[in-house]
């Protein structure tokens, strides 16, 4: 008996609805990087971590709005109607999920960037620190070092 199919899989139609819902709520670091590089109009990437984490490094072009401050400050930081992408530390942290929920409750179209800051940095994408913008070496367990993932 297959351990992978010990529990009956969803019907194809239900599975399609499930995966569409996930893609409607999530985006990944490669797509966010492409949108930032293209200057996608109306896109606001929100770092929902603490001030200390922000200073340690963040995505160039992101705005800093800790999760606990979203309800009080979203309107002054993020223009109404913006397409919001939230991120936090990484897959072991649900801060970006809580931030995305707060933006959704405020009426913003929002997605969570899966992988968070950890995978952004591990994939060798640019990171802004007080010393400037730099890139870490690509972790070959997260991204191909010399080619696009093409997934």
Image (spheres, rainbow, N blue to C red):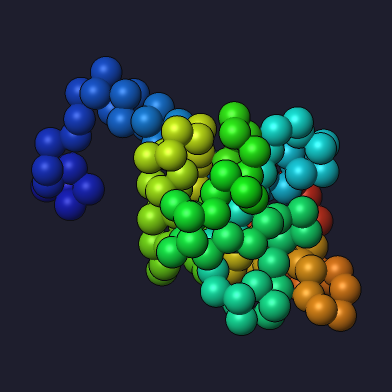
Q: Which of the pair 95/13 is nearer the observer?
A: 95
Position in image of residue 75 (x %, y %):
57, 44
Does residue 45 appear in this view? yes
Q: How many marks?
A: 0
Does residue 119 appear in this view? no
Reply above or below: 34 against 131. Answer: above
Position in image of residue 27 (x %, y %):
54, 42
Which residue lies at the image location 58% right of the left edge and 68% below the top edge? 118
What is the quadrant of residue 44 in the picture? top right
Which residue lies at the image location 52% right of the left edge and 64% below the top edge? 66
Which residue lies at the image location 61% right of the left edge and 81% below the top edge? 52
Query: Which quadrant: the C terminus?
Result: top right
Position in image of residue 68 (x %, y %):
43, 64
22 on left or right of 125: left
Q: Which of the pair 29/49 is nearer the observer?
A: 49
What is the quadrant of residue 104 in the picture? top left
Position in image of residue 128 (x %, y %):
79, 69
9 on left or right of 28: left
What is the quadrant of residue 36 in the picture? top right
> Most extreme residue toward the right, as rendered?
132
Which residue lies at the image location 76% right of the left edge and 33% below the top edge? 40
76 on left or right of 89: right
């Amino acid at each position: 008996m297959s351990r992978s199919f010990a529990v009956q899989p969803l019907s194809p139609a239900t599975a399609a609805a499930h995966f569409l819902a996930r893609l409607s709520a999530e985006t990944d670091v490669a797509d966010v990087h492409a949108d930032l590089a293209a200057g996608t109009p109306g896109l606001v990437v929100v770092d929902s971590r603490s001030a200390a984490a922000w200073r340690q490094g963040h995505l160039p072009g992101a705005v800093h709005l800790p999760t606990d401050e979203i309800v009080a400050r979203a309107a002054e930081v993020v223009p109404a109607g913006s397409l919001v992408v939230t991120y936090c530390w990484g897959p072991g942290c649900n801060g970006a999920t809580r931030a995305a929920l707060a933006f959704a409750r405020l009426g913003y179209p929002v997605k969570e960037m899966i992988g968070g800051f950890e995978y952004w940095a591990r994939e060798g994408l640019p990171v802004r620190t007080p010393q400037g913008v730099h890139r870490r070496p690509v972790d070959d367990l997260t991204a191909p070092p010399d080619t696009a993932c093409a997934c």
